[in-house]
Amino acid sequence: YFMAVAFLSAQRIKDSSSQVGACIVNQENKIVGIVYKGMPSGCDDDLLPWSRSADNKLDTKYPYVCHAELNAIMNKNSADVKGCTMYVALFPCNECAKLIIQAGIKDVICLSDKYHDTLEMTASRQLLNLAVVWVMSKHRVKVCICLILHRKIKPYQNTKYIWKNLSNQTIYSPH
């Protein structure tokens, strides 16, 4: 349900090449933040570029766009998001990982880790691991990756998914 809410919010993005929304949920399963990737408040997104590539990086969206994770944390509708869960389409980049950690979010559920091999995602996994933030990624092939092992609980019990750690070692398999 909450992932669907994140995807629904992403439909508002002008950028058709990468539609990412985020939904933050508190311990009572109430939504405390929902938003999508976009340009900073007060900046007319019709005047800024949305392209993925150009000869000059300033002519691309990358120096300007705010990721969904940033927008969700900054535009929350509660005093804080400590202990909350964030649902987001893509695995968070290193900059968003810093924000997630600083905000006190303890769980991140993402659907895709398609940029897994980039330096930014490697740094992100290291930061989230050190801060003991649970990150779960459900891939289309029905594999769940558990990125944090520090907690003593075993959230993967009674599930049909295979769970792996940062080293890609299986830590639970239902078979």
Image: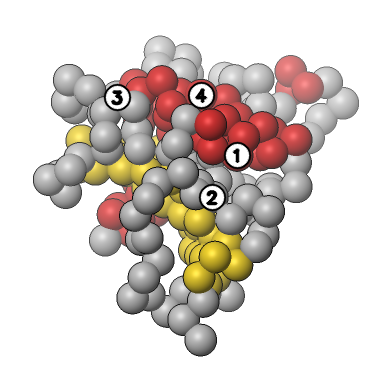
The kind of residue tagged 1 is: Arg
Q: Are marks 4 and 1 in contact (CB under 8 Å)?
A: no
Q: Which residue is mark 1?
A: 125
- Under circle 3, the secondary element is loop
Q: Going by the picture, which residue comes out furthest to the top? A: 42
**Disc nearer the start of the sequence (1/2):** 1
- The amino acid at mark 3 is Asn
Amino acid on which the number 4 mark rests in the picture: Lys
Q: Identify the residue at image location x=43%, y=27%.
A: 101
Task: Please determine whether, in this image, residue 151 is positioned above or below residue 2.
Answer: above
Q: Is residue 22 above or below residue 105?
A: below
Circle 2 residue? 147
2 or 4: mark nearer the eye = 2
Distance between mark 2 and mark 4 Cα atoms: 16 Å
Residue labelled with disc 4 = 98
Please name the amino acid that badge 2 sits on: Leu
Q: Earlier in the sequence, mark 2 or mark 4?
A: 4
Q: Is residue 50 visible?
A: no
Give neighbour class at mark 3: few <14, some 14-19, many 20+ (Cα, 10 Å).
few
Evaluate whether residue 7 shows in this view.
yes
For the residue carrying disc 1, how many other residues have a C-alpha within 10 Å: few (<14), some (14-19), or many (20+)? many
